[in-house]
Amino acid sequence: MSEPRHLLDVDDLSSAELVAVLDLADEYKRAQETGESHEDLDGQTLGMLFQKPSTRTRVSFETGMTQLGGHAIFLGADDIQLGRGEPLKDTARTLSRYVDCVMARVFRHENVEVLAEYADVPIVNGLTDDAHPCQTLADLQTIREHFDGLEDVSATWIGDGNNVAQSFLLGCALTGVDCTVVTPAEHTIDERILERARDLGGEPTLTTDPQQGVAGANVVYTDVWVSMGQEDERDTRLRRFEGFQVNEELLEAADDAVVMHCLPAHRGEEITDAVIESERSIVFDQAENRLHAQKALLATLVDSA
Ligand code: CP
Ligand code: NVA
């Protein structure tokens, strides 16, 4: 049996592979719109392991598997023996005997690495504290369709430099999107991720100044200030992120930039209701593209397993 391909972060794909996934995602989107059958994973099963809540990831993966002719099983961490202390490495080996791929949403990034080390099937990171590569696939598909390409696009990330931001930065580096990151000093991107982005040819600009950061951007992208598992830090975080809200005043510095958010959004914190509901917002295209991009990813990884 050949070694499975995993997606623990988006740079597990080469630039060419990433573009191929985006191309297939566009094909699946068209096939769905025209009603053309595309059951490329006929009879295959995806296990979906969740230690954190989810709306988009859970529903888009499960629906995607159905549309590809396969099946998905929801495995809440507390509903399986993992919640009673069964080691992750045993869970990985057991699930590998049943399913063709495992998508996992866990807290510590090391946990998807353990799954990948012990599983005989592809492991897909459905979000860890450090990375959210499936979100990045949908983000890039969305930007590409909106701007008819990626090469000349300039994107500004504003807010917390954690999971969604870090994968997005790597995705930009892989596809030639110019990326600026605006965060409070305490919440900047991890130095190791910056190094990986630079190794891929990215030249990210880092700043703590929101006005300066969004000036000239085609895309302004944000995420919550209090991620899942950080609820105890809420008060400190809200203080530190003051001034980083994506609102109409800030967007005056960004000309006609579109606005992205991975969702769920906390309206009134990192973004205003008016901006999410405005013409600039492409957040629901992003949400939809989770479905198409992940189908393309699954077809790519499961086929090559
Ligand atoms: N963006 C995202 O991953 O959403 P969910 O938490 O709803 O899956
Ligand atoms: N940064 C957020 C993303 C949710 C999709 C979190 O980790 O909660």
Image: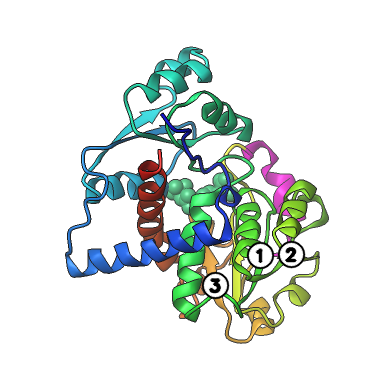
Rendering coords of residue 278 (x, y %): 47, 77
Q: CA distance from mark 3 to mark 2?
A: 15 Å
Q: Are marks 2 and 1 in contact (CB under 8 Å)?
A: yes
| Disc nearer the start of the sequence (3/2) | 2
Residue at 76% of width from left, 67% of height from top?
203
| Front-most of residues 289 and 241 | 289
Relative height, residue 18 to residue 258 (above, below): above
Residue at 33% of width from left, 47% of height from top?
59
Name the image quarter holding residue 80: top left
> Where does label 1 land, which residue?
157
Let me know if residue 265 appears in the view.
no
| Disc nearer the start of the sequence (2/1) | 1
Which residues lie in the magenta part? Answer: 230-244
> Where does label 3 land, which residue?
259
Relative height, residue 66 to residue 35 (above, below): above
Q: Are marks 3 and 2 in contact (CB under 8 Å)?
A: no
Rendering coords of residue 207 (x, y %): 80, 66
In the drawing, does residue 165 fall left or right of residue 94? right
| Disc nearer the start of the sequence (3/1) | 1
> Where does label 2 land, which residue?
182
Q: CA distance from mark 3 to mark 1?
A: 10 Å
The kind of residue on which mark 2 rests is Val
Residue at disc 3, secondary structure: strand
The kind of residue on which mark 1 rests is Trp
Rendering coords of residue 232 (x, y %): 66, 36
Residue at 44% of width from left, 33% of height from top?
2
Most extreme residue toward the top, as rendered? 85
